Amino acid sequence: MTHASSKPCPEPSPALLSEPAALNYQDSYICPVCRHGQIEAMTLMDAFACNFCRHIFTANLPTQTIQVVDSSQPMSWRWNGRKWQSIYRDAPSLTLVVWLIGAILVTLPGLIVWLSSVLFPPLPNSTWSWFPRVWVICTFSVHLLMVSWLLMEHYQLPLYVATRIRVAQWLGRR
């Protein structure tokens, strides 16, 4: 027994086609931010929106580029006909400053705690003689975790964005 459907099959997304396709408002594309959702044109607007991460993008069809408009980071991508290519807008000096400050925020507090444990060591064979080493390890670990989180927020890594959205959905915040 066969069942005939009255709905036609949807056209595949240009990102899934073998030949390159130009960016336009009629098709859907993989989201360049989360890489899980699809971006589609918003009704009565010259903009795209993702159905997963809910970012909004403005498009420049002549240059085949889009830019996220609901983020503090000015992230842009160029459509090459098959996939998105990031357009780096960060100045190399800014990237160097971000990484340098991150390295200082990870190492300096741990070095201060380590130096204090070396200059003022616990009494030998005391019950708390293990505490300075654990405190140094915890200091390095917590600062590394904080700087890693800030870097992931700054660079908007797709795995991080998708995980953040899924956790928010799991907690019922969306």
Image (spheres, rainbow, N blue to C red):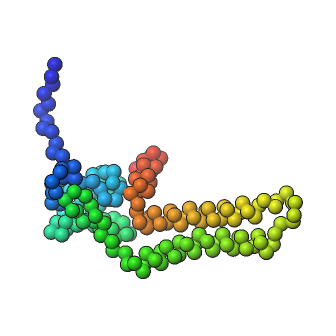
| Residue 83 falls left or right of residue 97 | left
On the image, the x and y values in percent for residue 129 come to 81, 61
Give the residue at x 22% y 62%. Answer: 79
**Residue placed farthest to the top in the image?**
1
**In the rendered image, the vertical position of residue 46 relative to residue 102, given as above or below:** above
Residue 31 locus on image (x, y percent): 29, 56
Is residue 15 rendered to the left or right of residue 35?
Answer: left
Q: Quadrant of residue 159?
A: bottom left
State the image coordinates of residue 143 (x, y, percent, origin top left). Answer: 59, 66
Please state which of residues 87 and 33 is positioned toward the viewer in this rendering: 87
Left/right of residue 92 with respect to residue 15 in the rendered view: right
Residue 91 in the image, given as x and y percentages of width and height: 37, 78
Which residue is depicted at the point 67% across and 62% down? 137
- Nearest the eye: 56 or 109: 109
Does 47 appear above or below 108? Answer: above
Q: Is residue 92 above or below residue 23?
A: below
| Res. 88 image quadrant | bottom left
Count of marks overlaid on the render:
0
For the question of whether residue 113 can be seen, the reply is yes
Which quadrant of the figure contains the N terminus?
A: top left
Given the current orientation, which residue lies at the most extreme bottom position? 93
- Residue 42 seen by the camera: no
For this rendering, which residue is in front, 28 or 144? 144
Residue at 19% from the left image edge and 63% from the top image edge:
46
Residue appearing at x 16%, y 42% in the figure:
10
Residue 7 higher or lower than 86, as above or below: above
